[in-house]
C-alpha cells in the first residue's frame, strides 16, 4: 500500500532485484553480498500470484495480528506448509 513500510510489493521487489540488484532502484549500490551462512532455501522460488495466496492489503487492517507466529516458517509462500495455501 502506498505509504506503508515497504515501498514496493514483494513481487515487484523480486523483479527489481533481478533487473538491477536491489528491491528498489533508489537503493542501488547500498547493499552487500550475502554471508556464507545466509544461503537461500533450496526450495525457494519467485512469488507467483497465480499460485500463491497472498493477502491484498486493506487500510485499517493489521495483518501482522493474524499471522501464526508460533512457527514462522509457515509464512514462507514457497513451502508446502504455507499457512495460506489454497486447497487444490
Image (cartoon, rainbow, N blue to C red):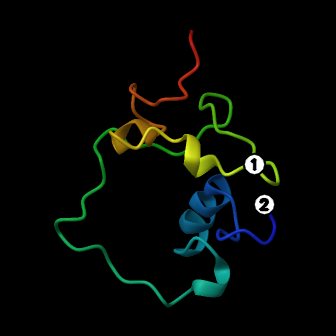
| Residue 84 tag number | none
Please tell me which residue lies in front, 88 or 84: 84
The residue under the point 29% across, 73% down is: 34
For the N terminus, the image quarter is bottom right
The residue under the point 68% across, 39% down is: 55
Residue 74: % across, % down? 40, 36
Distance from label 1 to label 2 (Cα)?
A: 7 Å
Q: Quadrant of residue 78?
A: top left
Q: Residues within 10 Å of mark 1 (few under 14, many from 20)?
A: few
User: As drawn, is 7 to the left or to the right of 43?
Assistant: right
Please tell me which residue lies in front, 62 or 17: 62
> As displayed, is residue 9 above or below residue 58?
below
Instruction: For mark 1, give the secondary structure.
Output: loop
Residue 61: % across, % down? 74, 49
Q: Quadrant of residue 69?
A: top left
- Asked if disc 1 and disc 2 are in contact, CB closer than 8 Å, the reply is yes
Residue 40: % across, % down? 30, 54
Please, which residue is most extreme toward the top here?
Answer: 88
Residue pointed to by mark 2: 1
Residue 37: % across, % down? 17, 65
Residue pointed to by mark 1: 57
> As displayed, is residue 36 above or below residue 50?
below
Amino acid at each position: 500500500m502506498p505509504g506503508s513500510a515497504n515501498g514496493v510489493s514483494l513481487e515487484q521487489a523480486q523483479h527489481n532485484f533481478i533487473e538491477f540488484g536491489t528491491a528498489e532502484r533508489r537503493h542501488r549500490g547500498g547493499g552487500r553480498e550475502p554471508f556464507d551462512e545466509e544461503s537461500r532455501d533450496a526450495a525457494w522460488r519467485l512469488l507467483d500470484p497465480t499460485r500463491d495466496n497472498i493477502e491484498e492489503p486493506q487500510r485499517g487492517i493489521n495483518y501482522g495480528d493474524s499471522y501464526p507466529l508460533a512457527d514462522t516458517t509457515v509464512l514462507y509462500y514457497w513451502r508446502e506448509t504455507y499457512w495460506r495455501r489454497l486447497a487444490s
